[in-house]
Image (cartoon, rainbow, N blue to C red):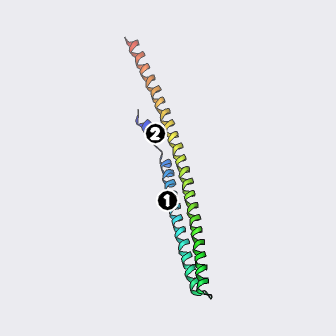
Amino acid sequence: MTLRTVQAAQPTEAEEKKMVNLRQGHTDRSDHTKSLLAGLLMGGLAGTAVMMLLAPQSGEKTRDQIQSKVIELRDEATETADNAVSQVRRKSKQVSTEVGEKVEELKQRSEKLIDEQRDHLSTILATENNEVKVSS
């Protein structure tokens, strides 16, 4: 196997950059999802606190409203988390598929190069054998 064959079987610089960008995109989305969930939670808590301070109604009615608001926020947070998990799973599956396709492509390219080198070596050996027979 020649140096050219080994180099051709390795991913190109552009392919490596694409794989790094895919991994970074996954990390960026994960950070975004965490920030979104934290923002929803903080906003819900702040809204609840303001509602308690400014409520012109009885304590029991205010507690009922707070309880229903907490349940509503919990349900929204659960839905948002479920959506985030679904997005991560879809993206993970997509990246996995792309990596698998790239691996298969590189495998086929390396097999092709190995076959080409075998053919080239066979040609050289056949030529040398013919030269040896002619000179004998």
Is residue 124 left or right of 53 when viewed as pictured?
left
Residue at 59% over, 68% down:
75
| Viewport quadrant of the C terminus | top left
Decide: few, some or many residues near mark 2? Use Cα within 10 Å; few <14, some 14-19, many ≥20.
some
Name the residue located 57 percent from the left edge and 53 percent from the top edge: 90
Amino acid under label 2? Answer: Ala
Residue, x 57% and y 57% (percent of image)? 86
Which residue is at the far front?
60
* Rendered image quadrant of residue 91: bottom right
Q: Residues within 10 Å of mark 1 (few under 14, many from 20)?
A: few
How far from the left and from the top, in percent, is residue 104? 52, 39
- Callout 2 touching callout 1 (CB < 8 Å): no
Q: Is residue 134 above or below residue 10?
A: above
In-image side of 69 versus 30 (left or right): right
Q: Which quadrant: the N terminus?
A: top left
Indicate the quadrant where residue 125 lies.
top left
Image coordinates of residue 105 in percent, x first then y, are 52, 40
The residue sitting at the left extreme is 136
State the image coordinates of residue 18 (x, y, percent, origin top left): 51, 51
Q: Which residue is mark 2?
A: 9
Q: Residue 4's x, y, as percent?
A: 43, 37
Is residue 88 or residue 82 the one in the foreground?
A: 82
Q: Is residue 101 above or below residue 67?
A: above
Q: Which mark is residue 39?
A: none
Q: Which residue is mark 1?
A: 27
